Structures are given as structure tokens and as C-alpha cells.
Image: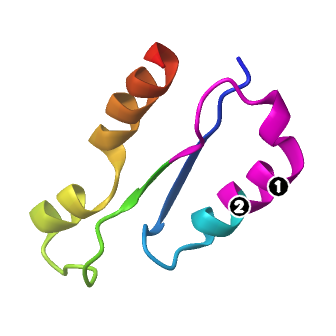
Amino acid sequence: TNRVLVVHEDTLTGGFGGEIAATLSEIAFNFLDAPIMRVASLDSPVPFNHALEKQFLPRERIAVALNRLLAF
């Protein structure tokens, strides 16, 4: 589809997904049909509470981002 969605459990800011996105944009920019999108954990400390941890990880946000990317 010539689209890229980088998903990882690290935080969005300062996470390794930014490096992956940067490398892909340097190498394959001309082949992409949409901007590279990233989905990651929230930019906050990892919570100890199980319910809060479920919100921290990007599970539900993956489907939303994927639909946005495919609709681009």
C-alpha cells in the first residue's frame, strides 16, 4: 500500500519509533503514498495500576491510526 504505520510500546516522544520513521522517510520518501504515522504509549511514566496500564499501551489507538492511514 506504500503506507507505513510504526507501532511500539515505548513513549511517542523520544521513542525508537521516531528513528524508524526518520530512516524510512530518508530512504523511501518517494515511494510513500501517505505520511508515516506513529502509534506509541502515552508520554507519561508507566503506571503500576492494571487498568491505567491498559490505557497507557497503544492497543485501541492502533486501529484508529490504521484506519486514518488507509483513508489518506
The picture places residue 49, in percent across and down from the top left corner, at: 12, 74
Residue 52 vertical placement versus 29 (above, below) = below
Helix, strand or loop status at disc 2:
helix
Q: Which image quarter holds the N terminus?
A: top right
Residue 46 vertical placement versus 50 (above, below) = below
Q: Quadrant of residue 44?
A: bottom left
Query: Which residue shows up at 79% across the image and 60% down it?
Result: 23
19 and 72: which is toward the camera: 72
What label sits on residue 26 in the rendered view? Answer: 1
Q: Which residues are magenta?
A: 21-37
- Using residue 26 as the reference point, say whether residue 63 is left or right of it: left
- Using residue 28 as the reference point, say whether residue 44 is left or right of it: left
Identify the main secondary structure in magenta: helix
Which colour style is shown? rainbow
Residue occupied by mark 2: 22
Query: Which residue shows up at 50% across the image and 18% down it?
Result: 70
Helix, strand or loop status at disc 1:
helix
34 and 47: which is toward the camera: 34
The picture places residue 18, in percent across and down from the top left corner, at: 60, 65
Residue 64 vertical placement versus 49 (above, below) = above
Three-letter code for the amino acid on which mark 2 is drawn:
Ala
Query: Which residue shows up at 40% across the image and 21% down it?
Result: 67
Label 2 neighbour load within 10 Å: few <14, some 14-19, many 20+: few
Query: Which residue shows up at 68% across the image and 23% down it?
Result: 33
The picture places residue 31, in percent across and down from the top left corner, at: 82, 29
The picture places residue 12, in percent across and down from the top left corner, at: 43, 67
| 36 drawn magenta | yes
Q: How far separated are the C-alphas under marks 2 and 1?
A: 6 Å
- Using residue 43 as the reference point, say whether residue 21 is left or right of it: right
Are the residues at dot 2 and dot 1 in contact (C-beta closer than 8 Å)? yes
